[in-house]
Image (cartoon, rainbow, N blue to C red):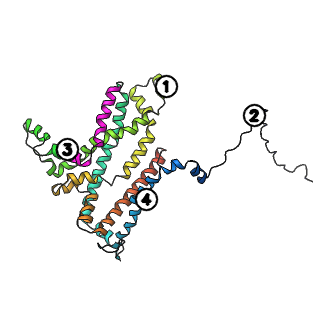
């Protein structure tokens, strides 16, 4: 028998009574992944081909990275003949040519990110302000069209426009100047590459931002107008915060491809005269690995490039999660 001063356990709260005529609410049973697979197997089957694509062309080739630490000889074992450790890594770390192409990669990647990331946002904001539907559709169609052109066609157009007898040099001659061999001078290559990237990708990049703009509540703009905010203030305090998650996601993805500067376009546009500013890691790998048959050395450089890209993605995601509150994961 308990004493009068002993502590008694608090009474347990009884569930509220169910009104007469009402059916009790049943808790939904947690569906396991097997039940979800049985229920929605048609939807999951759509992901089979994409998963096979990534498995065959993205993940299985990662096994070949082992030749970065083994000596590979054509005709021998696919995983190399002899273990050499960090020999090839020390080779490219002490190779001055590698550091030249590494610097070119950083410069071209930074310029591409500097111009090709914010310009789609600006174009999307400008298109969002247009009241004429016909003009808006016309501008969208014209800006989207270059994205559907092949890299080979874009490179051919650039070469034709900037050749000594091309349209650009004809305009230069018309104003009394002398023809400039743009594609034979290393100082012009970065401007040519970044300009062609902007022309080809900016219009297509506005699609996601225009879709994000449609999700912003119109009541926020109405409240901003009542508070006396002009169009610039509405854009700064309502529009940009509304599309911030999309901006952060695309920024992280662009940073992930920072080191993988467009290989095809550079390969088609550059030549030995423009190597000082045009040669990047991907083109250097092509010449070392495919042309010179030094696959182990090329694999070591490619592994180093991939490690830098992974580090950039993880760092950008962590910084964005802490500073902005939005991230990929």
* Residue 230: x %, y % from top left: 40, 25
Q: Dot 1: few (<14), some (14–19), or many (≥20) neighbours within 10 Å?
A: few
Neighbor class of circle 3 (other Cα within 10 Å; few <14, some 14-19, many 20+) is few
**Residue under numbered circle 1:** 223
Instruction: Point out the frontmost of discs 3 and 4.
Output: 4
Residue 12 seen in this snapshot = yes
SS state under label 1: helix
Relative placement, left or right, of 43 versus 274 is right
284 drawn magenta: no
Q: Earlier in the sequence, mark 3 or mark 4?
A: 4
Eye-nearest disc, 1 or 3: 3
Q: Are marks 3 and 2 in contact (CB under 8 Å)?
A: no
Q: CA distance from mark 4 to mark 1?
A: 50 Å
Q: Nearer the viewer, residue 233 or 113?
A: 113
Q: Is residue 65 left or right of residue 223?
A: left
Q: Which residues are magenta?
A: 133-156
The residue under label 2 is 22
Q: Quadrant of the N terminus?
A: bottom right
Is 112 on the left-hand or right-hand side of 41?
left
Residue lying at the far front of the rendered structure: 42
């Amino acid at each position: 028998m308990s004493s009068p001063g002993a502590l008694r356990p608090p009474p347990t709260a009884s569930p509220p009574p169910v009104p007469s005529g009402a059916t009790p609410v049943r808790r939904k049973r947690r569906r396991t992944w097997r039940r979800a697979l049985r229920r929605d197997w048609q939807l999951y089957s759509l992901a089979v081909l994409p998963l096979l694509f990534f498995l065959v062309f993205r993940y299985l080739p990662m096994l070949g990275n082992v030749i970065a630490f083994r000596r590979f000889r054509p005709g021998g074992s696919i995983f190399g003949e002899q273990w050499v450790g960090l020999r090839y890594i020390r080779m490219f770390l002490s190779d001055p040519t590698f550091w030249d192409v590494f610097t070119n990669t950083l410069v071209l990647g930074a310029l591409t990110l500097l111009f090709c990331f914010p310009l789609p946002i600006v174009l999307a904001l400008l298109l969002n302000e247009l009241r004429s539907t016909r003009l808006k559709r016309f501008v969208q169609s014209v800006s989207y069209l270059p994205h559907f052109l092949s890299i080979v066609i874009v490179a051919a157009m650039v070469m034709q426009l900037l050749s000594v007898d091309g349209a650009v040099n004809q305009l230069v001659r018309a104003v009394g100047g002398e023809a400039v061999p743009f594609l034979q001078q290393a100082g012009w290559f970065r401007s040519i590459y970044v300009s062609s990237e902007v022309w080809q990708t900016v219009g297509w990049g506005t699609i996601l931002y225009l879709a994000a703009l449609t999700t912003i509540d119109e009541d926020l703009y109405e409240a901003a107008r009542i508070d006396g905010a002009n169009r610039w203030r509405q854009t700064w305090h309502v529009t940009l915060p509304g599309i911030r998650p999309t901006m952060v996601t695309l920024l992280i993805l662009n940073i992930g491809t920072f080191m993988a500067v467009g290989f095809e376009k550079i390969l088609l546009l550059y030549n030995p005269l423009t190597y000082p500013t045009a040669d990047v890691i991907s083109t250097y790998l092509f010449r070392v690995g495919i042309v010179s048959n030094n696959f182990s050395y090329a694999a070591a450089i490619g592994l180093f490039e991939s490690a830098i890209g992974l580090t950039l993605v993880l760092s950008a995601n962590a910084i964005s999660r802490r500073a902005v509150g939005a991230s990929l994961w």
